[in-house]
Image (cartoon, coloured by chain):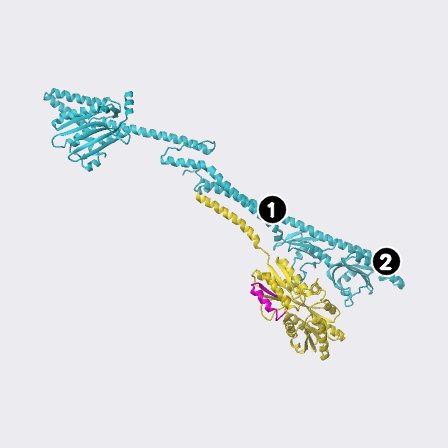
Chain colours: A yellow, B cyan
Amino acid sequence: MKRKKWISILLIFVLVSAIFFLVERDGKTKEKNVVMIVKIIDSTNDFWTSTIKGANMAAKEYGISLTVLGPDAETKYEEQGAMIQEAIAMKPDAIVLSPASYTETPEYAEKIEDAGIELILMDSVMEKEMGSCVVATDNVDAGKKMGNYIVENFSEDVNIGVVGHVQGSSTAIEREEGLRAGLGDLAENIVDTVFCDSDYRKAYKVTKEMLKAHPEINVIAGLNEYSSVGAARAVIALGLEDEVHMIGFDSSLKEVEFLESEVFEAIVVQKPLNMGYLAVENTVRILQKKDVPQYIDSGSVLITKETMYTPENQKLLFPI
Amino acid sequence: MKQEINGKKPILIRRFKSIRTSILLSYILVVLVSVAVFAMVALNYTEKTVLENAEEYSTQLINQVNSDIDSYMDYLRNTSILISSNADVHDYLFGNSGDAAQKEEQIERIITQFRTILDTRDDIVNIGIIGKDGKYIINQGLFHINENIELENVEWLQKALDNHGITAISSSHVQNVVAGRYEWVVTLSRGLQNKSTRDIEGVFFVDLNYSSISELCDAISFGNRGYIYILDEEGSVIYHPQQQLLYSGLKQEKIDEVLHAKERSFVTEDGKLYCVSKSSETGWTVVGVAYVSELLKNSGETTKIYVISAVLILLAALVLAVFLSREITKPIKVLSNSMREVEKGNFENIMLDVRGENEIDRLGASFNMMTTEIKHLMEQNVEDQRQKRKSELMALQAQINPHFLYNTLDSIIWMAEWGKNKEVVLMTSSLAKLLRQSISNQNELVRVEEEVEYTRSYLTIQKMRYKDKLEYDIQVVPEVMRYKVAKLILQPLVENAIYHGIKYKEGKGSVLIEGFIKDEELILRVTDDGIGMTENQLAHIFEKHETDMRRNSVGVLNVHERIQLYHGKEYGLTYKSSPGVGTEVEIHLPYEKGEQHEEEKMD
């Protein structure tokens, strides 16, 4: 009789705990929270709008909750720092950060790792090596595409002028490095490198000055959107569009027009949507404790007038 | 209990110690299995239904999308027919005559028509006509052809020219023909025939805003993660939420499978439900993709409810099983307890309370009958055994020792020879009394009086034989004389006293017989002053003396046993003895006043 009572109690216990297990399991599959801090939130900025779109795409696909924060201008690294603090206070599982400053942002980013939150870097890196993963365009590879194009399409007597964006910035260094690597022996033919500090007018000015100082220049490579467009305007203003071959970087409506009107021979574009998507996708993998490579290239592609309207390139040049 | 019914082993039931456990466990097992099976079937059915409903629903949704797109296309096609047959359009593109003012009016009329269409439909981005010779009117006439574009390379335009008056629908693309307006559109184009040359020499086109299609697709929800995509006839992606990822190779989508799908829906290995709808109007295939896991998420609620109710049913069944098994096995338990008492030989309070009509009640009734019978038989058996023993003992006791008889007769002969007539008469009469008493009285119980008389006769003979060596005295109080006691109990003790006590004594021995009441007991005491017994002899007094058969064959033990058989275990003999002093034996017998009277009445 006693034994039977115990068996009954045991049975009831097992059944009740089965119910609890079921209910508990439901609660366990709670959403992961990820905060993404971009360099700029601006609906006119195609690059970052596409990045955020890609990030949201991945968030939807993997069923995580994604919050996107960002200042209204790329230069406002202090504002971005405040947003990092804000993000930490939200206690997310991971933060995806596109550091606004190579030198200033680490100070803020350190707090993310201190708080025990996974840090994933997107688009750019910082002075201090941080984060469990970096998702960005391989800028060396992108620069190399420019160099290769020059080697393949122009004769050996090229004289190259480079219009960079911000001197000392990792992207400028890497793209120029890639360009030189792509050029190979022709790297010696780089006559001058100027910087525009990501400003159209300055790009226009320095390009004009460079062309005046080195009239032998017949190839100009722009290293970002500002330098490419500013340089193109300078070339047009000087009436040299037929003499000087130009290769731009990044995409905008203006660059597309220059490409169509053959001011640019080619442009190298990044894949921001892929970048945003890959950043979130790999964040999810990190949170699932899966192996993720340290560096993930979101890719870049060189587009000429002939390849502008291929299905893929259309999407890159004209993001909706 | 050990016997098997039909010789077969009921394996399950016999595993457990009690029937109750067996009933309990088998009951629970049956309920558990049936509830589990039921829940599983129900869950499966629910899942299937959910999936079927989702399929049905998804198919309806994508058919809706398809018919929406068809209606767009239908409208655009009608517009294209309208414009193609317009005389102004024909004249503007192919007519050479007419003055400038007339031409101006003609253009104005075409633009008005375009404007009307553009104003009424905000999903139309561009509408225009383009002639081979470079004439064109686009929208309100304010837009121009992109000079950087070579029209020969524009796919939709060439298709319209090659298509001989049939409308062509492009895939989604950026409309780069219209200068300064890089819009994502789907273009419907149609070749315009120059009636005089009968050649296609112009193109009408209308651009449908791509976002009106993408919004149509985005607006439809297939769960949180599900989506819709559209393929054209060749399998190019017209719309896909992750189009760019597909192009970059980061994602794959099922295109061939969908284009060649025989079923209107299928489930892939990775748990996605594909619903396919192909439009005959556009040739496009609209595909809805839903995640099965998401569809079944709501059925998770159902699962929980099923499981909880299953558990509750099990609990209820458990309680019921405990209660039922107890109720069923209670009478069996009572029966088994009673049986155990019977096994111990206890027949008191074992009668079962039989009220019902079922098998166990019948069993109980049989049990009652059986135990009553057994009890009766056992009692009878005891009684029979008692009777048998009594008879045996009596038979033994009743025999007069032949030695004694011989010796007595021998004494009589000697006395006769010696002419002692008086003594001969006394001894012979005493012997005659003795013999008569031992053979005549068939009653097992006799009066103390008779016992005393019998003993007196015996002593008379012995006294005569042993002469001066034996003295005796009988002092029995008259109250006890009429009590009935077992027959032949006193004489054997006297005989014993003479043969074992006095016979071996040097000189005279005496025997004293007393009868009195003491402590509610009738006591007959035989005291001799013979050689007495050692403690060892005394301890073995009640043992059977096989070797003593001749003299004392039925002696002390026989008397003792018979007293106990007739009067009860509490009665019998007690000895006191010490060597050289003598032996005293007491016969303890029941004494009740009432009994005396009854006995008297019976007599």
Toward the viewer: B439 or B341?
A: B341
Residue named by callout 1: B45
**Secondary structure at numbered mark 2:** helix
Residue B87's label in the rendered image is 2
Look at label 2 and name its amino acid: Ala
**Secondary structure at numbered mark 1:** helix
Residue B76 at x, y = what percent? 78, 56
Left or right: where B270 falls relative to B185: left
Look at label 1 and name its amino acid: Tyr
Mark 2 crowd level (few <14, some 14–19, many ≥20, 10 Å Cα)? few
**In which quadrant will I find the C terminus of chain B?**
top left
Looking at this rendering, what residue extends furthest in the left direction? B418
* Residue B476 visible in the snapshot: yes
* Residue A282 visible in the snapshot: no
In the image, residue B5 sits, relative to residue B430, either above or below, namely below
Please report contact status of discs 2 and 1: CB closer than 8 Å, yes or no. no
Left or right: where A199 falls relative to B194: left
Mark 2 or mark 1: which is in front? Answer: 1
Task: Measure the C-alpha gap from mark 2 to mark 1.
Answer: 64 Å
Residue B158's label in the rendered image is none
Give the residues drawn in magenta, as a range.
A101-122
Residue depicted at x 44% and y 31%: B354
Left or right: where B300 falls relative to B600: right
Residue B296 at x, y = what percent? 61, 51
Residue A219 at x, y = what percent? 71, 75
Q: Is residue A112 magenta?
A: yes
